[in-house]
Amino acid sequence: MSRSLRGICTAKLRQLDLPSPLTVPRLCAHLEAVRQRPITLMPLCGLPPGGPCGIWVATSATDFILYRDSTSPVHQSHIILHELAHLIFEHSHGLDGDYRRLLLPNLGETAIQRILGRSAYATPEEREAETLASLLAQRISHPPDDTTAESADEQILRTLLE
Ligand SMILES: [Zn+2]
């Protein structure tokens, strides 16, 4: 993880002014309010092995985050964060047509503005999304509020008093 990439992602996070403590639903609600567009999370079963674990589909009205549900809750959450990171950065690149037809038989080609598949990390956009997803995951497991600092102080105090 290069420092500049991490710097870009940290700046992006600061700019978002996320609520604390942060959860995946609260992150989605915050992004919906900022972007003025609904986000729908959809578990997806039957994704072929080796293919993407998550996909962001932006239609004219809604952002859909499809994620593989045959994996652990922690992994599911990371897949969702990765796709939300693409959305936050407004990334766009194509997923190949076979996947599109397989996964989205009911969505017209014209309705789909962007499709992203979480399968390879070779592109700069993938590294950017993965870095931001990791930073978001850290926020979610360790919210940066004063309670942790206070509890650490309290622990020291308790140790001194004992
Ligand atoms: Zn990706």
Image (cartoon, rainbow, N blue to C red):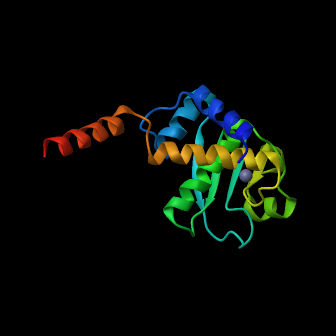
Percent across and percent down for residue 41 are 57, 50
Residue under the image location 49 percent in, 62 percent down: 73
Answer left or right for 66 relative to 4: left
Whether residue 20 is visible here, answered yes or no, is: yes
Whether residue 112 is visible here, answered yes or no, is: no
Residue 55 falls in which quadrant of the image? Answer: bottom right
Percent across and percent down for residue 9 are 66, 37
Of all residues shown, which one is farthest toward the bottom?
49
Of all residues shown, which one is farthest toward the front?
160
Percent across and percent down for residue 119 are 75, 61
- Judging depth in this view, the residue of 76 and 58 nearest the camera is 76
Residue under the image location 56 percent in, 43 percent down: 136
Residue 105 falls in which quadrant of the image? Answer: bottom right
Answer left or right for 83 relative to 102: left
Percent across and percent down for residue 89 are 71, 36
Q: Count the marks.
A: 0
- Judging depth in this view, the residue of 160 and 66 nearest the camera is 160
Answer left or right for 67 relative to 89: left
Of all residues shown, which one is farthest toward the left?
162
Above or below, 145 relative to 122: above
Residue under the image location 65 percent in, 31 percent down: 12
Above or below, 40 relative to 29: below
Residue under the image location 28 percent in, 40 percent down: 151
Above or below, 39 relative to 77: above
